[in-house]
Amino acid sequence: MQNIIDSIRAGGYASAKARQFTESVIREMSRIAAAHNAINLAQGFPDFPAPEAIKQAAVRAVTEDHNQYAITWGTKGLRDAIAAKVKRDYDVTIDPESQLTVCCGATEGMIATLLATVNPGDEVIIFEPFYENYGADVILCGAVPKYISLNPPGFNFDREELIAAFSDKTKAIIINTPNNPTGKVFTREELELIAELCIKYDVLAINDEIYEHILYDNTQHIPLWTLPGMAERTIAVNSVSKTFSVTGWRIGFVQASAEITASVRKVHDFLTVGAAAPLQVASAEAFNFGAEYYQELAGFYSERRDYLLAALEKIGFKCVRPQGAYYIMADITPFGWDDDVAFAKYLASEIGVAVVPGSSFFRPESTAGKTLIRFCFCKKFETLKAAVDRLEKLTLK
């Protein structure tokens, strides 16, 4: 027994799981931006006001005393509003009483889902590059991540590589579409292959779709759970953060079958008890916005994408044109750099613009992100133009 204790102590007080990943690089870059007074194009939060209607709804909710615990899995008003939105947008009927769990952001929604469905030793397929939480979440569950490359410039995956990744050990696959960090939107053909493999191997699909309404160039978002045979095995993780520009509210939700939802709700209950009650009340009102709101949202971000993309390419970056979300991946090699972390720190400290190093979206042993950085454009035009003015100091090699 003493030998076991000594072995554990040799690694310090951090658990073996915690030693397998770092803190968030994205959020670290926000701290670096503040330290150098750099323009923050790293972390994906807007620097413009949220819609006035949703802010006023939050004020009313507080003054009307919606300030105590809500039902653990979400206020009835919010769950009803989400179900109505799903019906309106996708013509799918879900039961708000048994198929929805309101969480503290999509971040909690994802870890609650994995803890509720995945066992230690199970394999979980993750497309790479990936939002940094996915790898850490899988490790925290004691599961084994299996990575499938999304290959530039289109960030498409190899069919045979994906087929080979599925086995009797596979418990789940995580799909993020529209994708962070690449802006890729998975096609119907790609989703149909994923669905076919999930059904064949009895695998759960966890669909992160928080950017579902931020789409460009007539690209269509197809929820995996709308494909034949996938409704009962797909778990959709979503949030109000990106759609309504309230990333600090931390109101997310998980949509799944009644059986899976029952498990997710138990984990959610003991993770956080519940999300902020007045902000749930306000979010319910936001889901009543008409179709024009979502059209204006996509147009709003499309203008910013086009502006920043053109400016970055003029400066000399090799960029990938995103189909959705609000990020641009860029190659730094034209400037003579091959170390994304060093370049990101140089940009923040010497140029005055903060970005995210590309390697943070890849497994630690990968070198694929070493020449990439990620810009976000969910900012005021003044912010983007000021950042471009600073980036114009860069010189090509």
Image: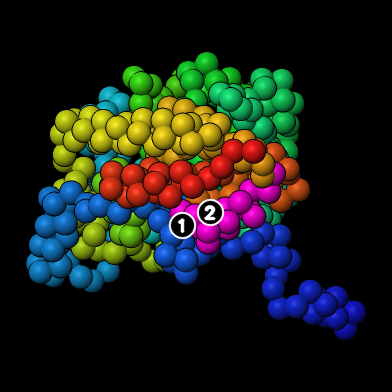
Q: Residues within 10 Å of mark 2 (few under 14, many from 20)?
A: many
Q: Quadrant of residue 69?
A: bottom left
* 346 part of magenta stretch: yes
Between 36 and 62, the one nearer to me in the picture: 36
Q: Tell me the number on the disc at residue 102.
A: none
Verify CB contact (< 8 Å) between mark 1 and mark 2. Answer: yes
Residue 267 placement (x, y as % from top left): 49, 59
Name the spot of residue 108 as percent of width and height, x first.
45, 56
Q: Which quadrant of the rendered structure holds the C terminus?
A: top right
x 58%, y 20%: residue: 193
Q: Secondary structure at mark 2?
A: helix
Tag 2: amino acid = Leu
Q: Is residue 346 above or below residue 179?
A: below
Q: Is residue 275 left or right of residue 59?
A: right
In-front residue for pair 138/267: 138
Q: Is residue 390 above or below residue 182?
A: below
Instruction: Give amino acid for label 1.
Output: Gly
Of callouts 1 and 2, which one flags the residue occurring earlier in the amino acid sequence? 2
Residue at the spot 67% in from the left edge and 65% down from the top edge: 18
The single residue placed furthest to the right in the displayed view is 3
Residue at the bottom extreme of this rendering: 2
Q: Is residue 136 magenta?
A: no
Which residue does the numbered mark 1 point to in the structure image? 352
| Segment tinted magenta in the rendering | 338-353
Q: Residue at x 73, y 43 (%)?
A: 367
Q: Is residue 13 visible?
A: yes
Q: Nearer the viewer, residue 396 or 131?
A: 396
Which residue was labeled with disc 2? 347
Instruction: Using residue 133 as the reference point, say whether residue 380 is left or right of it.
Output: left
**Which SS does the magenta portion mostly show?**
helix
